[in-house]
Image (cartoon, rainbow, N blue to C red):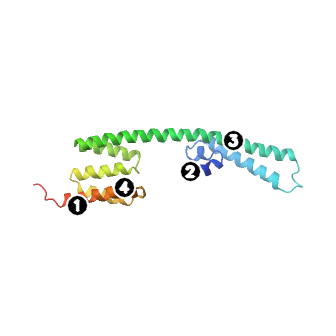
């Protein structure tokens, strides 16, 4: 579990409210806050106002109850997020494979339309951006390919793809130096 997921699981209902936008997550987070405040006040507050040990014990049991509901919901939410991420990854992988096949066959328009569809789903897909730049270079749209690659170089996730980006830029400069057919 990553650090941010671990931190999010400390407050019951947070993930369900923030990530999924569910009202029951907001309700659980609010009830947990009220129970925690009550438990802290009854435990550490002035003794002359609160001296009922049953109230202190029940407040902490309520806090633990809300926390256990939050942990149970968190487990459900994690499995739902994993399934969603896995389905998206599988769909993007199959689209990338189809786009690459069209690219290798020389079907530039089909490859580009698939890549544009992929980028609409995930604008941070570096492989799709590289394939788009390659299609733009192959279809003699050097200015668009140059713009795509320049933007791609500044993307934080593109650091491991710098060799491929530079290779594509070199091929682009070789293509632009060729005389244009009349």
> In whole angstroms, how far apart are the C-alphas of marks 3 and 1?
60 Å
Q: Position of residue 132 (x, y in %)?
A: 30, 50
Q: What residue is pinned by disc 4?
A: 161
Residue 71 or residue 18, whichever sits in front? 71
For the C terminus, the quadrant is bottom left
Residue 23 or residue 8, whichever sits in front? 8
Look at the numbered disc 2 and give the secondary structure of its residue. Answer: loop
Residue drawn at x 76%, y 43% as measured from the top left: 62
Which quadrant would residue 31 be assigned to in this image? Answer: top right
Mark sitting earlier along the chain (2/4): 2
Which quadrant would residue 110 be assigned to in this image? Answer: top left
Residue drawn at x 24%, y 44% as measured from the top left: 108
Mark sitting earlier along the chain (4/1): 4
> In whole angstroms, how far apart are the C-alphas of marks 3 and 4?
43 Å
Q: What residue is pinned by disc 3?
A: 68
Mark sitting earlier along the chain (1/2): 2
Q: Position of residue 30 (x, y in %)?
A: 68, 47
Q: Single out the residue that lies furthest toward the left.
A: 182
Mark sitting earlier along the chain (3/2): 2
> In whole angstroms, how far apart are the C-alphas of marks 3 and 2?
20 Å
Q: What residue is pinned by disc 1?
A: 173
Q: Is residue 142 left or right of residue 46?
A: left
Which is closer to the viewer, label 4 or label 1?
4
Q: What residue is pinned by disc 2?
A: 2
Which is closer to the viewer, label 3 or label 2?
2
Neighbor class of circle 1 (other Cα within 10 Å; few <14, some 14-19, many 20+) is: some
Residue drawn at x 35%, y 49% as measured from the top left: 127
Marks 2 and 4: CB-CB under 8 Å? no
Which quadrant would residue 165 be assigned to in this image? Answer: bottom left
Q: Is residue 87 left or right of residue 72?
A: left
Look at the numbered disc 4 and give the secondary structure of its residue. Answer: helix
């Amino acid at each position: 579990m990553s650090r941010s997921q671990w931190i999010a699981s400390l407050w019951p209902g947070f993930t369900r409210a923030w990530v999924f936008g569910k009202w029951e997550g907001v309700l659980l987070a609010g009830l947990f806050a009220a129970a925690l405040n009550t438990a802290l006040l009854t435990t550490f507050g002035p003794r002359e106002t609160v001296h009922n040990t049953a109230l202190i014990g029940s407040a902490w049991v309520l806090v633990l109850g809300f926390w256990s509901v939050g942990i149970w919901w968190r487990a459900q939410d994690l499995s739902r997020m994993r399934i969603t991420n896995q389905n998206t990854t599988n769909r993007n992988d199959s689209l990338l494979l189809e786009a690459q096949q069209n690219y290798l066959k020389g079907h530039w328009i089909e490859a580009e339309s698939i890549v544009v569809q992929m980028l609409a789903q995930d604008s941070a897909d570096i492989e799709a951006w590289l394939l788009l730049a390659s299609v733009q270079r192959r279809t003699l749209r050097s200015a668009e390919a140059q713009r795509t690659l320049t933007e791609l170089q500044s993307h934080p996730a593109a650091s491991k793809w710098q060799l491929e980006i530079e290779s594509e830029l070199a091929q682009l400069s070789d293509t632009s130096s060729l005389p244009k057919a009349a």
